[in-house]
Amino acid sequence: MRRVSFRWVALGALVVALLLAGVVSHYASSEPDGLNRVAQDHGFSQTEKDHEADAPLAGYAAKDVDNPRLSGGLAGVVGVVVVLALAGGLAFVVRRRGPAS
């Protein structure tokens, strides 16, 4: 059996993550889940407030992009890239430290 290089596995995982975030996320359910659902079930969802900050990716949408499908996909792709960059940076720092003396 032939071994697959880590680079190909990592590239495949990156492509899958970007496709899920950029394309498939558009088809996700719009029904509330998690904390939003609990708030609705227990009757305190009306106390929810909008974000005060004018963040570029607030509400799972890219700011100043008029097409909602493109806006959501772009926000997802940016989120994947940021998370992978942070995780990769952390892995690089931990790996360079080496075992404790």
Image: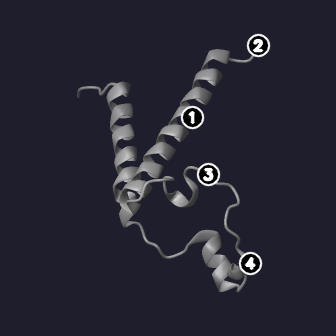
Which of marks 1 and 3 precedes in the sequence?
A: 3
Label 3 SS: loop
> Which residue is rendered at x = 48% and y = 43% of the image?
78
Which numbered disc covers residue 101?
A: 2
- The quadrant of the picture occupied by the N terminus is top left
Amino acid marked by disc 2: Ser
Which of marks 1 and 2 precedes in the sequence?
A: 1
Instruction: Report which residue position mark 1 lands on.
Output: 87
Of labels 2 and 1, the one closer to you: 1
Amino acid marked by disc 1: Ala
Of labels 1 and 4, the one closer to you: 4
Cα distance between the residues tagged 3 and 1: 22 Å
Cα distance between the residues tagged 4 and 2: 52 Å
Cα distance between the residues tagged 1 and 4: 34 Å
Tell me residue 14's x, y (percent): 39, 38
Of labels 4 and 3, the one closer to you: 3
Which of marks 2 and 4 precedes in the sequence?
A: 4
